[in-house]
Amino acid sequence: MLTVKDNNKLDLPKQDNYERALAIGLDIFSRKDPKWIAKKSGSLISRGGAIVVPHLNMHVLLDLETKKFTIQETGEEAPIWLSILCVHYLNSSEGRKPTGKLKHFREFKEGAFYEPAFNRRTKEILIAVFGKNPSLMVEVGKELNGKVLDSGDAAIELSYFPFMPITCVVWKGDEEFPPEATVLFDETAELYFSAEDMAVAAQMAVLELMRRSKR
């Protein structure tokens, strides 16, 4: 089981050649109609010529001329992992909205293969950080524009991207049972992300909850 101290040492899941993955994604994007993509992904086109993609409580900008990703609120360059997830989301968007039917990660294609690592990077963090105080997850989740759900002892739905929600649920432990947690996706998630992308997105969402809980 992870401890709170261990959480600060977690590394990103390894992906071969981030730069190449981003370049391939941008090449695919360059052959698409930006206005169509913006409409189908729940994004918009800014006057400055960028696709504006809502992400948690921020916005990721993809400059249509330079093909650079930045965070609108800070003006900083987006981390490469976020840029990759964003371009994969845009490239896969066809307007399919979430149905509200949630599934465990292992239920998606290749999810069972990645599940042990997925649980270490998501479920175990939630238990370590929020297992004794589930309401804290709701508090920090609201800071990320999360939607409070009636599930477990605390549940928050995070809009990772407009049509890509990630739901975190925590059950408080007692004298008989230890704390428990789970991370769920809408059944449409596999239309946008591979299992590996889903794992990275979920981990980074959970780590953001953890970081805000330490303030």
Image (cartoon, helix red, strand yellow):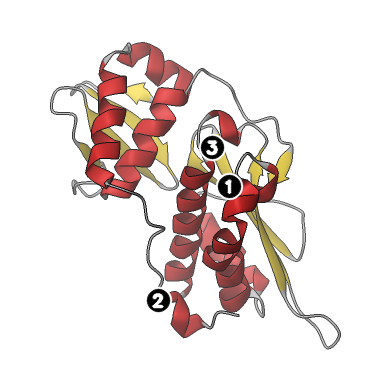
Judged from this view, the residue extending furthest toward the left is 66
| Mark 1 crowdedness (10 Å alpha carbons): few <14, some 14-19, many ≥20 | many
Figure check: 129 above or below 157: below
Badge 3 vs badge 2, beta-carbon distance below 8 Å: no
Q: Residue at x 51, y 38 (%)?
A: 194
Locate residue 2: give its quadrant.
bottom right
Residue 112 picture location, percent across and down: 65, 51
Judged from this view, the residue extending furthest toward the right is 176
Q: Which residue is mark 1?
A: 166
Residue 175 picture location, percent across and down: 83, 88
Which amino acid, mark 1?
Ile
Nearer-the-camera pick, 58 or 189 = 189
Q: Tag 1, which secondary structure?
A: strand
Can residue 146 be seen by looking at this rendering? yes
Q: Which residue is mark 3?
A: 164
Residue 147 picture location, percent across and down: 61, 48
Figure check: 98 above or below 77: above
Q: Quadrant of the C terminus?
A: bottom left
Number of marks:
3
Residue 88 picture location, percent across and down: 40, 32
N-term-proximal mark, 1 vs 2: 2
Q: Tag 3, which secondary structure?
A: strand
Badge 1 vs badge 3, beta-carbon distance below 8 Å: yes
Which amino acid, mark 3?
Met
Q: Residue at x 52, y 53 (%)?
A: 202
**Marks 1 and 2, Cα distance to the nearest angstrom?**
21 Å
Q: Which residue is mark 2?
A: 8
Nearer-the-camera pick, 12 or 114 = 114
**Marks 1 and 3, Cα distance to the nearest angstrom?**
7 Å
